[in-house]
Image (cartoon, helix red, strand yellow):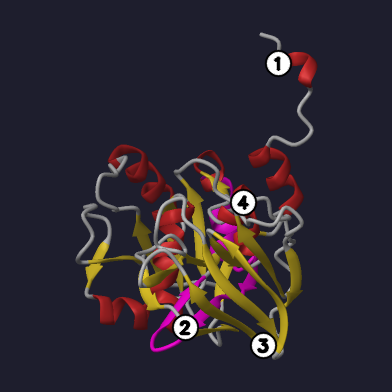
Amino acid sequence: MFKNIGIYIKEKSGEGIDSHGLDVLIDNLKKHTPKVFIEDTSKYKNNSLITIKHSEFVSKVDLIIVFGGDGTLLRSARKYLEHNIPILGINMGTVGFLTDVKTEDFESIIKDVIDGNCKIEERNLVSASYNTTAYGLNEIVIHSGAYTQLMRYRLSVNDKVVYEQRSDGLIIATPTGSTAYALSAGGPIIHPGLDVWTILPMLPQSISSRPFVISSDEKVKVNLLKGPLEIAKICADGQEDIPVPYLEDIQISKMEHKLRLVHPINNDFFEACREKLGWSLDISKKSS
């Protein structure tokens, strides 16, 4: 059972907050729990919420409800990961594989969640290290740093060379990320219950180059050999690029911390695939 609920709202620059829609959802939430907290830095204001500082927020709340899209949940995960607080995503965005509860279903599921009638799923994260460390819930992308220009690199697994090739970059994706950027790059969909990585080159020069899947317990190394600029870039979950010079070795490993995602008890990954990716559409009805 969850007693102290915190909320996190999408507030990325340029995004608007649907205050009226949020007010309705918060009213529904307050019917089931009197203590709902929000950080004092939030732009969203609601007099029924208890406003507290970040340090008190992370020590007090035992569930964070994220209102937004998958990008909002990714930002909240990065902010609260080390505090091991479960996160429930309410989809106010578009696709929403992580924020899998629709706003119209919120009232019907929130009491069950607060009462503990839900599933808590642990998702692994992937990290890339050389002089600094970047980590991602979805993926690590290593790229040339220049638009439409190739880099040369060597990929090794457990100190054995897999290949040396030229491409725009390399994606190391978690199962969570298999329905994100890696999917757009031609990678497979991986069930989130599997403890694996998908490794796929971005626009490789070799037409025989294909993605492959390995255990996330393997030791992966990427040696940057040559590129169009003096530095390549590392990008985690679409965040800011981190510069890394060529001839550096980048170590890829599994993060010790895990993200704890809360789902309704009837959550179905394949239903989400059917709905959000358009599987099983009746093409005879699309003529109009």
Which amino acid does the dot numbered 1 rest on?
Answer: Lys
Q: Which residue is located at x 25 percent, y 44 percent?
A: 14
* Residue contact at pointers 4 and 2, CB within 8 angstroms: no
Relative horizontal placement of residue 153, taking residue 21 as reference (left or right): right
Q: Which residue is located at x 23 percent, y 60 percent?
A: 42
Q: Which residues are magenta?
A: 107-136
Q: Is residue 268 visible?
A: no
Q: Mark 4 packing: few (<14 Cα in 10 Å), some, or many (20+)?
A: some
Task: Give the CA separation, mark 1 to mark 2.
Answer: 52 Å
Residue on which the image places disc 4: 185
Dot 1 or dot 2: first in sequence order is: 2
In the image, residue 220 lies in the stretch drawn in magenta = no
Residue on which the image places disc 2: 247
* Residue contact at pointers 3 and 1, CB within 8 angstroms: no
Dot 3 or dot 1: first in sequence order is: 3
Dot 4 or dot 2: first in sequence order is: 4
> Which circle marks residue 286 in the picture?
1
Task: Give the CA separation, mark 3 to mark 4.
Answer: 23 Å
What is the secondary structure assignment of the residue under circle 3?
loop
Task: Give the CA separation, mark 4 to mark 2.
Answer: 26 Å
Which amino acid does the dot numbered 4 rest on?
Answer: Ala
Dot 2 or dot 3: first in sequence order is: 3
> Which circle marks residue 219 in the picture?
3
Dot 4 or dot 1: first in sequence order is: 4
What is the secondary structure assignment of the residue under circle 4?
loop
What is the secondary structure assignment of the residue under circle 2?
loop
Question: Within the image, what quadrant is residue 35 found in?
Answer: bottom left
Q: Which residue is located at x 61 percent, y 77 percent?
A: 154
Q: Which residue is located at x 69 percent, y 35 percent?
A: 278
